[in-house]
Image (tube, helix red, strand yellow):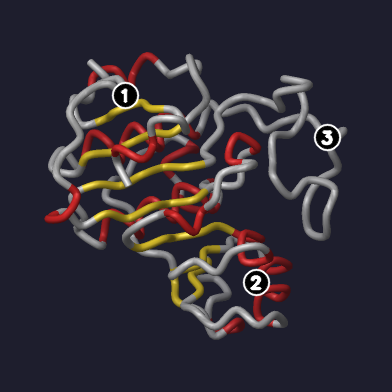
Amino acid sequence: WIGRSNCRATTRSRMKIVNVIGNGESRKGFDLKQLSGTVIGCNAIYRDFAPDILCASDQSMCKEIRESDYAGPLYTRPDWNKKFNALAYKELPWTGKQKYDDPWHMNTGPHAINIACKENPDRIVLIGFDISGSKDNPDKINNYYKDSVNYDKASHRRIPPSHWHPQLNNFFRLHPDIEFVYVQPINPDIPKEWGQNTNVTITDYQNLGKYT
């Protein structure tokens, strides 16, 4: 089963919490500065908020980041990490023959989660990992930074989440000692396979304070 937001939240004062911030539109209006613990961000988040660790998979985004004032550690693909004076993404905790098992076919968010897992936290809070399309148009791209440099137009069709479902599920399944808190608006469409993990809690932004 997957726990709901009214479940008991473990005492935070003794916990190591890592927050991983995706750029789904659901996080609009949420103040990231109120988070406690380490914050790992993805791509253009640095434009509005400086995470403790930043991840970017595309060379164009790495170039933008390196031309900015962001001074924290940057992770990217091992194919070009040295080119951007960045750290290489960490090895995945699984292998497989499916396309979604190949690190090259994994976007920035799952790589950021993998880095969070390597921090050996008690809890990982996932914010902005939207698995649906835009709220106003479900078939269109769901991204906080759409229509900006290095991002697709708002009219672009969304990427099907079929790879994200098993990728995230693998992190949940292979790290049973980590509590994962997945933050989404009320009544999100949760993949069925996630329900097999007892270490996953689904909550919304109104109740997120219980876990951060």
Q: Earlier in the sequence, mark 3 or mark 1?
A: 1
Asked if residue 111 is positioned above or below residue 178 in the image, the reply reads below
Residue underneath mark 3: 156
Q: Tell me the residue at 45%/30% (across/down).
A: 206
Asked if residue 212 is positioned above or below residue 69 in the image, the reply reads above
The numbered disc on residue 5 is: 1
The quarter of the rendered structure image containing the N terminus is top left
Depth check: 127 or 156 in front? 127
Q: Position of residue 70 (x, y in %)?
A: 60, 79
**Alpha-carbon neighbours of circle 1 within 10 Å: few (<14), some, or many (≥20)?**
many
**Alpha-carbon neighbours of circle 3 within 10 Å: few (<14), some, or many (≥20)?**
some
Asked if residue 127 is positioned above or below residue 148 in the image, the reply reads above
At label 1, the amino acid type is Ser
Depth check: 93 or 21 in front? 21
At label 2, the amino acid type is Cys
In the rendered structure, the answer to whether residue 42 lies left or right of residue 166 reads: right
Asked if residue 134 is positioned above or below residue 187 in the image, the reply reads below
In space, the residues marked 3 and 1 are separated at their CA atoms by 33 Å
In space, the residues marked 3 and 2 are separated at their CA atoms by 22 Å
In the rendered structure, the answer to whether residue 70 lies left or right of residue 144 reads: left
Q: Tell me the residue at 41%/42% (across/down).
A: 126
Depth check: 11 or 4 in front? 11
Q: Tell me the residue at 21%/55% (across/down).
A: 121
At label 3, the amino acid type is His
In the rendered structure, the answer to whether residue 18 lies left or right of residue 157 reads: left
Residue underneath mark 2: 62
Q: Earlier in the sequence, mark 3 or mark 2?
A: 2
Mark closer to the observer (3, 1): 1
The part of the image, by quadrant, that contains residue 63 is bottom right
| Secondary structure of residue under mark 1 | loop
The part of the image, by quadrant, that contains residue 169 is top left
